[in-house]
Amino acid sequence: MLRFLIVDDNKVRVDKLRETLHEAKIVDENIDICTCAMAGRKLLRSTQYDFLILDVCIPRREGDRPAKEEGINLIKDVSESQKYIIPEEIIGITAYDEVFDEVFSEFNKRMIHVIRYKESSNQWRDKLTKKILLKLGFKKDKLSGHAVVTVHGIRTYGQWQKLLEDTISEQGISAKVINFKYSFLPIFSYCSFIVKRKIAMRFSTDLNLLLKDTRYDTIDIIGHSFGTQLIAYALKHLEPGCKKKIRTVIFSGSVVPENFDWNGIVGKKIDRLINDCACDDFILLVNKCIIPFAGMSGRVGFKGFDEGVVNRFFKGGHDTFYMRDKTIDSYFIKKYWIPLLAGSNHIIKYDNRGKPGALEDLYFMIYVAAFLKDITCYVLPFWLIFYLVKTTQPYFYKILTFD
């Protein structure tokens, strides 16, 4: 069932809004009401709402004079600050024509609909009811066969997967969470190309089978760390002729190479890729320096055109997406992942990298060193062996080249 937050200090209008929601079969238990911006902020810190209905002119605190700036500031804060969980839909409402004209461009820029309220007319009520019914229809039709696939990283049992599953249930999203597990993978196994390929092939097989499952018409995938590499491999090797498209893929702490070619995947096999990066991810730096042909797109983002690929940059380390103050926490999941899994087309874009400095030069040197490491330690020896075999042992060369 949809959840609503009404932020409005006009009691008469609030009663009419509540009446309109009742007509759309929304019960009072799913309607929260507050009369000032600060009270609205408090609720938006902890609850995922489907709709925020906001009086554009509201007081900052209880007893203050209403001001249109407070409505605009609330919208900006909710959209741009990590403190708040952005609602799936935001609707502005005002009875003043001059206020409507002033705030329209700001709201429209953020894809927020503004309704003119007139006590003598039911036109505003019809518009609101239409939006609610559309949302109810979307939830019923689009998410009835919804599967969310999760893939964890190495040296973990994937505790965040259970956290995500609980959060999805808590937020009222009708989806089957399918967790891909491959047990605890120690570092020395992660260094083995054979071990990693075996796990990747298994996940690829499972994903292809899931796409054939007629119970699910909407599939989202979330991966962390090495899990993102498994997902990228599987997407690249989806069986030809698969008619079902994956809706959203979310990467966090990704080890996929930053120059990975998404052409032929984004827009064809998946609708959109959200790559959540942690600017202070030291683990990915180590991964880049040590592991053969490793990437750190979970720190620097993916390169190339950004159509269908959204890089978001947050302060924090490798586990910042599900940890807060050194304890497992669902705050990030609620604010940045739940709206996407609920079907929202609005993607919260976030870039907290700051201005480039001396550290960027250091990262570039690490890039160069890692590239030289890959060439010197892995490519050159194999090339020399291949060359020697070719020139001295033609028989073995034919075997190696399947000639």
Image: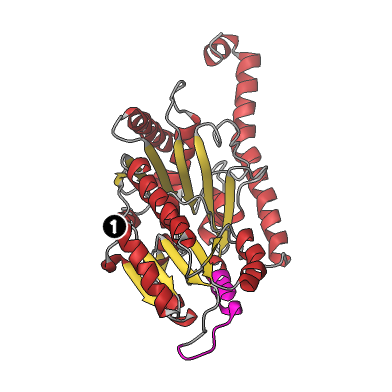
- Amino acid type assigned to the residue bearing label 1 in the image: Lys
Q: For residue 358, which quarter of the picture?
A: bottom right
Residue found at the far front of this picture: 120
Q: Residue at x 47, y 70 (%)?
A: 119
Give whichever of 107, 339 is nearer the camera.
107
Give whichever of 309, 120 is nearer the camera.
120
Q: Residue at x 34, y 66 (%)?
A: 19
Q: For residue 321, which quarter of the picture?
A: bottom left
Q: State the image coordinates of residue 212 (x, y, percent, origin top left).
A: 34, 27
Give whichever of 354, 96 is nearer the camera.
96
* Quarter of the image that includes the C terminus: top right
Which range is magenta?
A: 62-77
The color scheme shown is secondary structure
Q: Is residue 69 magenta?
A: yes
Q: Residue at x 43, y 73 (%)?
A: 13
Q: Residues within 10 Å of mark 1 (few under 14, many from 20)?
A: few
Observer able to see residue 106: yes
Q: State the image coordinates of residue 68 (x, y, percent, origin top left).
A: 59, 77
Q: Is residue 232 magenta?
A: no
* Quarter of the image that includes the N terminus: bottom left
Q: Secondary structure at mark 1?
A: loop
Question: Is residue 19 depicted above or below 284 in this figure?
Answer: below
Q: State the image coordinates of residue 135 (x, y, percent, origin top left).
A: 40, 51
Assign the magenta stretch its main secondary structure. helix
Question: Is residue 96 depicted above or below 308 in this figure?
Answer: below
**Which residue in the structure is indicated by mark 1?**
25
Q: Residue at x 68, y 64 (%)?
A: 359
Give whichever of 207, 119 is nearer the camera.
119
